[in-house]
Amino acid sequence: EVQLVESGGGLVQPGGSMRISCAASGFNVSGNYMSWVRQAPGKGLEWISLIFGGGTPYYAYSVKGRFTISRDISKNTVSLQMSSLRDDDTAVYYCARGDTSLDYWGQGTLVTVSS
Amino acid sequence: SYDLSQPPSVSVSPGQTASITCSGDKLGDKYVCWYQKRSGQSPVLVIYKDNKRPSGIPERFSGSNSGNTATLTISGTQAMDEADYYCQAWDSSTVVFGGGTKLTVL
């Protein structure tokens, strides 16, 4: 059974950093596109990053230069290192499998940026 | 950047057909998928590659895509279908979401 479980969210101050992770089971992250998508309070879904195998990562303009996506094949996880966090980065962050369509999603982890 | 436009809201009576549109430049040249998002829950893929249904998605969900518009159709809408719906396309190695449509079943 395919499962995605996010972890690492919480409260962080503006300008701070946070790392969130996504543990995959039932498939290998190395052979799949993996995406991060977020939803700010009262807003719609926003794609923010994508990685495939050892290929070039892709980022939305809103996070480019601040966020870094990576994967650990040995642990079958995908992570998102977030820095220079701003108030408008407050959101539920989801990891999802896929590119042209996202067929499996995690339960999400809440990141709150506030002083 | 590529933009997808959806109506903010659509209302439908139980048992009737709901249609939610998604517009974008030459959208018919791309694959479109649709997600259902209930409050407090993770998104669920209901249509992929314009008109394919993942396993477990009811037959009342269907999709089409031509020209500049993709459409999600829900036939015989049920109260449980009340949710936000998002279209999504793939453009220049990025995932693009529409702004979402709130479906209200009155």
Image (cartoon, coloured by chain):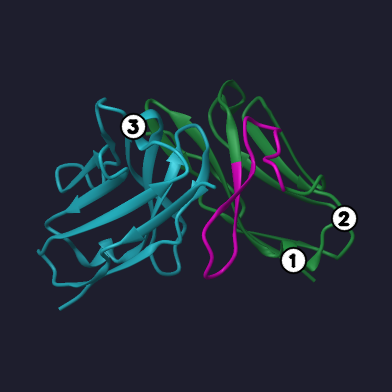
Chain colours: A cyan, B green
Residue at (26, 25) in percent of width and height = A55
Viewport quadrant of the C terminus of chain B: bottom right
Which of the chains bears the disc numbered 3? A
Q: Which residue is mark 1?
A: B80
Label 2 in the same subunit as label 1: yes
Task: Please tell me whether residue B91 is drawn above or below residue A14 in the rendered image.
Answer: above
Q: Position of residue B83 (x, y in %)?
A: 64, 63
* Residue B49 painted magenta: yes
**Quadrant in the rendering for residue A103:** top right
- The residue closer to the viewer here, B5 or B36, is B36
Callout 2 secondary element:
loop
Find the magenta span and give its range.
Answer: B34-56
Q: Which residue is mark 3?
A: A30
Residue type at mark 1? Met
Query: Seen in the image, is A113 located left or right of residue B88?
Result: left
Distance between mark 2 and mark 1 Cα atoms: 11 Å
- Which dot marks residue B76? 2
- The residue closer to the viewer here, B11 or B14, is B14
Distance between mark 1 and mark 3 Cα atoms: 36 Å
- The residue closer to the viewer here, B89 or A6, is A6
